Image: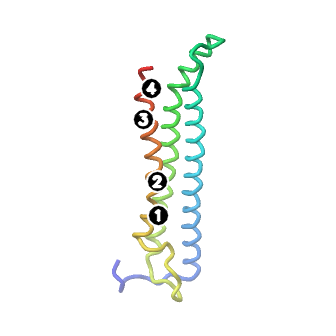
Amino acid sequence: MSDASKRELSLESYHVLRGQIEHEDQLINHRLSWLVSAQSFLLTAYAITLNAPVQFSIPAYEHLNRILFRLLPLSGLAVVTLIYLTIIAAILALLRLRALADGELPGGLPPIHGHRGTMWLGLIGPLLIPCVFAVVWIVLAVNGAGH
C-alpha cells in the first residue's frame, strides 16, 4: 500500500489492534513455555528409561520399559508438532493483524507492532526452538529403534 493511499487509524482502532497483537504475542509465549516444559518432562522420562536396571526384579517391567523407550520419542515429536502448529497459527494471526494496522497512526503514536525486521527476528525463537526439539527426538528415535 503506498503512503498516499494509507488510511489513518482511529485511536480506538489503534488500541484494539495493539491489544490483539499483545494477546497473540502472549499466546506464543505461553505455547513456547508449554513446549519447553513438556519437552523437559519427556526428556527426563527418557533419561530415566535409559538408566533402568539391566535385570528387572519384575520381568513385566522390562517389557514396559522397552515400550516406554520407544514411545517417548514419538510422544515428544507429537507434542512438538501440536504446539508448533499453534505457534504458527498465532504468527499467522499476527501477520493478519499487522496488515490491518498498516495505516497512518493517530497523534504520532509508536508503531503497533514494531518494524518488520525486528518482528521476524523476535519470532526466530518460537519458530526454531520446536525444530531443535524435533531433531533431538528424531535422532533419539532413529538411534534407539534398534535396541
The numbered mark at residue 138 is 3
- Find disc 4 in the rendering and name its residue: 144
Specify few, some or many for label 3: CA neighbours under 10 Å numbering under 14, 14-19, or 20 or more.
Answer: some
- Find disc 2 in the rendering and name its residue: 88
* Alpha carbon separation for disc pair 3 and 1: 26 Å
Q: Which residue is depicted at the point 53% across and 30% down?
A: 72
* Alpha carbon separation for disc pair 1 and 4: 35 Å
The numbered mark at residue 122 is 1
Ranked by sequence position, the earlier of labels 2 and 4 is 2
SS class, disc 2 = helix
Q: Is residue 122 above or below residue 115?
A: above
Task: Tell me if label 3 and label 4 are in contact, CB under 8 Å.
Answer: no
Of circles 2 and 4, the one toward us is: 4
The amino acid type of the residue labelled 3 equals Ile
The amino acid type of the residue labelled 1 equals Gly
The residue lying toward the viewer, choosing from 72 and 83, is 72
* Alpha carbon separation for disc pair 3 and 4: 10 Å
SS class, disc 1 = helix
Q: How is the image coloured?
A: rainbow
* Alpha carbon separation for disc pair 3 and 2: 21 Å
The amino acid type of the residue labelled 2 equals Ile
